[in-house]
Image: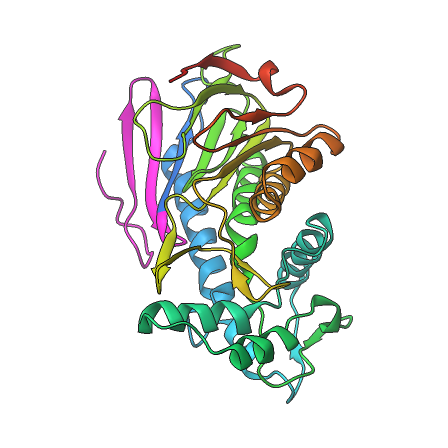
Amino acid sequence: MGTLTAPLDKPFYLSQERDLTVLSFQAFGTRCKVKYSACESIDFEFASQKVVSWVQEFEQRYSRYLENSWLSLVNASAGIKPIPLTEEDVLVLRAGRFAFFQSNQMIDPSCLSLTALWQKAKEKNQLPQEHEISEAKELVNWENVQILEDEIYLPFQGMGLDFGGFGKEFAVDQVSEKLRNLNCENFLVDFGGDIFASGFVTEGVPWKIGIEKPGGEESPGFIVSLSNRALATSGNYRRFFDLEGKRYGHTVDHRTGYPTIHSELSASVISPSCLKSGIISTTCLMSGKQAGLRMIDSEWNVEGCIQSFDSPLLSNKFYQYVQNENST
């Protein structure tokens, strides 16, 4: 099967991988896949069109990089006027609120002033001035965002929302729910490593997923078996940049105003939802190994591992998911 000529802005592909039917497309700046189990007898082309169409609409509405997106309108109206909300906007904002409190306020969706500042610094290859960081930090506070019954208002000019800390994981959960509404029960959604595994790859056999070792070694650190579980991994060992002799991660900590600097560290979290897994894995990355592991162990129905070049730290029941460990 080749490119489908659906009325969509971007092409997508259906192919066969052994007994699986695989949907592939680009979104969120990464490669996205949906793998349909051989157990399924649905119309794969119809389901795939629904998935890609929804993802594109989501990106067009909530991307901060598109000038005509709803999110860009909200940000441009900061300190000026409120903007109307749809039901889906409310769902996304609830996810943002969940990210803020689940992360002990480390993930703040109102962080655009800081993320944009550091993006500009990376492009110019020049560190921001201290006063610029301080001014940007002053604008970051989710609790200042005013969400009314049918409107949202950012009270300060220069304040802005950025859903990059949870948007892709939210989308994974939403796509999974939409597939189930189409009577598809056995599938795997993988948006650039943010994953939800539903049902089985073949009858009674869970999906097997590799968790990469920091440093990009070819063999995975762990292979886990998942059914009706999500997996998300956060790491600075692939997404980083160097400025003035120091390496910075891609996640900006709004408490300090600086990107995280934990070197060669990744956190992988298994939970019932990709949104929760992504929030906890990012929080672990920002907290460091020991504090991150304590957070995982404190959560009900959540397991995970935190890796660096030395021995990985594992939560209490992580091994119940491990299919095979490839040790160095």
Based on the displayed image, in which of its 4 quarters is residue 76 positioned?
A: bottom right
- Establish if 185 lies above or below 4: above
**Residue drawn at (36%, 45%), measured in percent from left and top?**
238
Q: How is the image coloured?
A: rainbow
**Residue 240 visible in this rendered orientation of the protein:** yes
- On screen, residue 301 versus residue 285, left or right, reads right
Quadrant showing the N terminus = top left
Q: Position of residue 265 (x, y in %)?
A: 48, 39
Q: Position of residue 192 (x, y in %)?
A: 40, 42
Residue 8 highlighted magenta (yes or no): yes
**Residue drawn at (38%, 50%), measured in percent from left and top?**
239
Residue range highlighted in magenta: 1-30
Quadrant showing the C terminus = top left
**Residue drawn at (39%, 45%), measured in percent from left and top?**
49
- Establish if 53 lies above or below 68: above
> Of residues 58 and 263, which is closer to you in this image?
263
Based on the displayed image, in which of its 4 quarters is residue 161 positioned?
A: bottom right
Residue at the top extreme, as displayed: 204
> Of residues 25 and 101, which is closer to you in this image?
101
Q: Position of residue 282 (x, y in %)?
A: 57, 46
> Of residues 177 and 71, which is closer to you in this image?
71
**Residue 74 visible in this rendered orientation of the protein:** no
Q: Position of residue 53 (x, y in %)?
A: 42, 52
> Of residues 98 and 128, which is closer to you in this image?
128
Residue 249 highlighted magenta (yes or no): no
Residue at the front extreme, as displayed: 245
Residue at the bottom extreme, as displayed: 80
